[in-house]
Amino acid sequence: MHLGTFVPYMALLTDLHSRIHRSLRISIVDKCDLRCTYCMPEDQQFLKRDALMTREEIRTLAKLFVEKYGINKIRLTGGEPLMRPDVVDIVRDMAALPVKLGLTTNAMRLHLFLDDLIGSGLKSLNISLDTFDAERFRTLSRREGHDRVLANIEQAIDRGLHVKLNMVVMRGVNDDELLRFVELTRERNVHVRFIEFMPFAGNKWGRDRVYTYAEMLGRISSMYTIEKLDDDPHSTARSYRVVERIGGDSMSWKGTFAVISTVTEPFCGSCDRLRLTAEGKMRNCLFARQETDLLSAMRKGEDVSPMIEANVLAKHKMLGGLPKFNPDKQEEVLDGLSGRPMVAIGG
Ligand code: SAM
Ligand code: SF4
């Protein structure tokens, strides 16, 4: 079935702010083999296995979202999705649906799955990389593995996957590496995405640690002539390409970069995303404080469709009902957060 923009027989998931939801993030496991400081507390408790959606339950829910509600984009995430032994089967199930499919990973275990993931129909990977410095990686992720991550990223690019690299830029932590990441786009066909540091439970967020969109562009523009690229209307990222290094050689840069500015310039007005946590709870926003337990209802044999529709209708206009992240009202931001760290939501 071809899904164009006009979908006559589907009950599209439209909220009270006229946003149509066509994109679903599915967290398939909440566990992770890293402990990134910005994502989770060191002592995070993980779900027991029987609390997780099974492969079959993921497929059933995904099919419902796609076939009944016109979802045409699915991204598998976690926790770390490659911690799940049946990840390749889940990718295969999703690839059989008429959706644009992606997976977000820290690449620690990518060498174990790369062939099978490609074989099961995956074409696009988002990989997290916050630093080129091994010691810094150890501090940030509280684990070893930097070499392996770098090697696996190379492999993924060489194998022809469409790779986006996600870097969470934090002031005083890794902002000094911004231009090195931009340089990566000179020779490699890679899309680097600079993400503003977002507040979540237990991640020691502070407004002063957010290296802002404006600061990033200012720093990059001081060294490079850049051009703005067109973005998908629902994109969370604003994309650019380097035209040339100021005073340097003129050449064609193979990759691109983008900024995701959730903190200083949120993109809620065009948001088309919904989320399922690893235990089958539906969330209509990263910052939502309410969620809908689809999995428990499904396990009792209930029809979850009305629950899905109600969840979408309850979506707040902005940031899950939080006020814009005001630097002068940091306590207000922290008080408003849901209890979930990012690792338990699924980014
Ligand atoms: N484990 C996988 C990974 O690291 O790519 C997938 C899950 S991770 C939660 C998804 C994305 O969320 C990663 O790119 C990560 O950098 C990002 N992320 C986590 N915490 C964040 C925060 N506080 N602010 C901005 N991005 C964050
Ligand atoms: Fe794990 Fe990804 Fe969170 Fe890092 S960002 S702790 S790799 S889930």
Image (spheres, rainbow, N blue to C red):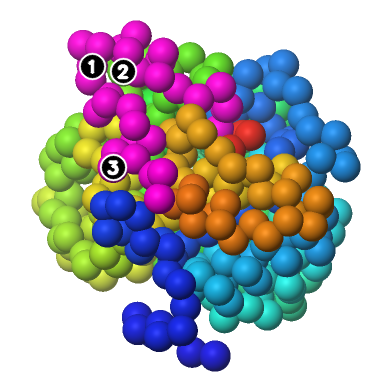
Which residue position is annotated with label 1?
A: 327
Circle 3 packing at 10 Å, graded few (<14), some (14-19), many (20+), is: some
**At which x and y percent is residue 148?**
70, 45
Which residue position is annotated with label 3?
A: 317
Taking the spot 46% from the left edge, 35% from the top edge, the residue there is 288
Which residue position is annotated with label 2?
A: 207
Amino acid type assigned to the residue bearing label 3 in the image: Lys
Does the closest atom of ligand 1 sit within 8 Å of the Cβ of label 3?
no
Q: Nearer the viewer, residue 180 or 267?
A: 267
Q: In the figure, is residue 213 to the left or right of 310?
A: left
Under tag 1, what secondary structure? helix
Amino acid type assigned to the residue bearing label 1 in the image: Pro
Taking the spot 63% from the left edge, 34% from the top edge, the residue there is 344
Q: Quadrant of the N terminus?
A: bottom right
Q: Label 2 to label 1, Cα distance in Å?
A: 6 Å
Disc number placed over residue 189 in the picture, else none: none
Q: Which residues are magenta?
A: 313-342
Q: In the figure, is residue 119 to the left or right of 156?
A: right
- The reply to whether the C-beta atoms of the residues labelled 2 and 1 are less than 8 Å apart is yes
Q: Is residue 132 visible?
A: no
Amino acid type assigned to the residue bearing label 2 in the image: Arg
